[in-house]
Image (tube, rainbow, N blue to C red):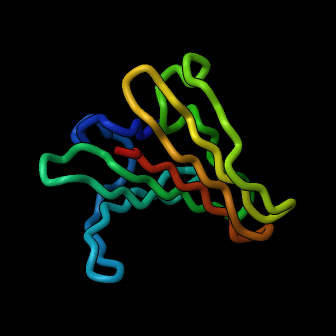
Amino acid sequence: MNIFLGEPISNINNGVLKQKFINNQAFKVIKGQRFTYYIKTDENGIVKEVVAKSSRELAPISYFIQNPESCTKKLLFRAPLRMAIWQYDCPNAKVEYKTFGPPGFLNTKAKLLK
């Protein structure tokens, strides 16, 4: 399942969409086959941030950015076997892509930067 940043949430038609509140912030939750997605949108329903959680794998950047090969990729931070933060400078947006967590509790976070 692809949840592209900067796209309307209404384009997502797979999975069950639920509302959940975490630390007073509203997230839309989709339980997919491989990942559970926590999606944060702006007031217009545009996807601004996505967290994908899984016990076995990290979600690839292509789940969050259309045509990631057209973007410039820069490593911002790396903690071996624990965390990496990448910045993707794309023609129409700038995205922070973060992978973190020990095996069994893997998280991938993609965030649209201003």
Position of residue 22 relative to residue 10, above or below, is: below
**In the image, what residue occupies the spot 43% across and 20% down?**
91
**As drawn, is 61 to the left or to the right of 57?**
left
Picture quadrant where residue 103 is located: bottom right
The outermost residue toward the bottom is 23
Picture quadrant where residue 16 is located: bottom left
Q: Nearer the viewer, residue 20 or 26?
A: 26
Q: Nearer the viewer, residue 35 or 83?
A: 83
The C terminus - image quarter: top left
Q: Does residue 1 appear anywhere in the picture?
A: no
Position of residue 59 relative to residue 92, above or below, is: below
Residue 13 point in image, percent of width and height: 31, 39
Residue 101 point in image, percent of width and height: 71, 68
**As drawn, is 33 to the left or to the right of 111?**
right
**As drawn, is 4 to the left or to the right of 51?**
left
Q: Count of labels shown?
A: 0
The outermost residue toward the right is 80
Residue 79 point in image, percent of width and height: 81, 62
Q: Does residue 22 appear anywhere in the picture?
A: yes
**In the image, what residue occupies the spot 61% across and 54% down?**
98
**As drawn, is 82 to the left or to the right of 61?**
right
Picture quadrant where residue 104 is located: bottom right
**In the image, what residue occupies the spot 58% across and 41% down?**
87
Residue 8 point in image, percent of width and height: 24, 38
**In the image, what residue occupies the spot 64% across and 45% down?**
86
Q: Nearer the viewer, residue 31 or 27?
A: 27
The outermost residue toward the left is 44
Position of residue 36 relative to residue 111, above or below, is: below
